[in-house]
Image (spheres, rainbow, N blue to C red):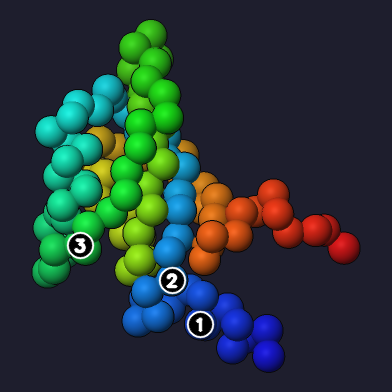
Amino acid sequence: MTGDFVYKVTHPKHEIEKTYTVTIKGIVNNEEIEKLRIGVKIDDYITKPAKVKILKTDEEKNQSRLEITIHEGKNRQVRKMCEAINHKVLALHRSKIAGIGVKDIPVR
């Protein structure tokens, strides 16, 4: 049963919303954010539109922190999306899946 649940919430075909907090090298600009929102070419496909929010930019460290929400969740998709706009991922954390945040789940 656990396997079925994991499959249903993680497999791209189910299009469950997944939210990631991503720290990238460099300061993002509005044009790059818009590309992510519309969809970028990675591998042999164009990603579906994503919700993207800039959480923080740190010019001293030359880093940006974004919140990216996608429905696909293909292999290494968020990393590849950031590479498509010429930013290397420094840290990546899935913070929500299907609207449920990591902090919402009790630890047993």
* Mark 1 touches mark 2? (CB < 8 Å): yes
- The kind of residue on which mark 3 rests is Thr
What numbered label is drawn on residue 16?
A: 2
Disc 1 to disc 2, C-alpha distance: 8 Å
- Residue 3 against residue 48 in the figure, above or below: below
Left or right: residue 47 compared with residue 108: left
In the image, residue 9 lies at what x, y percent? 51, 75
Task: Return the residue at label 1.
Answer: 8
- Residue, far top: 60
Disc 3 to disc 2, C-alpha distance: 15 Å
Task: Return the residue at label 3.
Answer: 47
Indicate the quadrant where residue 58 lies: top left
In the image, residue 88 lies at what x, y percent? 30, 38
Crowdedness near tag 1: few (<14), some (14–19) or many (≥20) residues, C-alpha within 10 Å? some
What's the residue at 38%, 9% (across, down)?
60
Q: Earlier in the sequence, mark 3 or mark 2?
A: 2
Instruction: Tally the marks.
Output: 3
What's the residue at 20%, 62% (across, down)?
47
In the image, residue 73 lies at what x, y percent? 37, 66
* Mark 3 touches mark 1? (CB < 8 Å): no
- Residue 104 against residue 74 in the figure, above or below: above
The reply to whether residue 74 is in sight is: no
- The kind of residue on which mark 1 rests is Lys
In the image, residue 62 lies at what x, y percent? 33, 17
Crowdedness near tag 2: few (<14), some (14–19) or many (≥20) residues, C-alpha within 10 Å? some
- Residue 94 against residue 15 in the figure, above or below: above
- The kind of residue on which mark 2 rests is Ile
Q: Secondary structure at mark 3?
A: loop
Disc 3 to disc 1, C-alpha distance: 20 Å
The reply to whether residue 104 is in sight is: yes
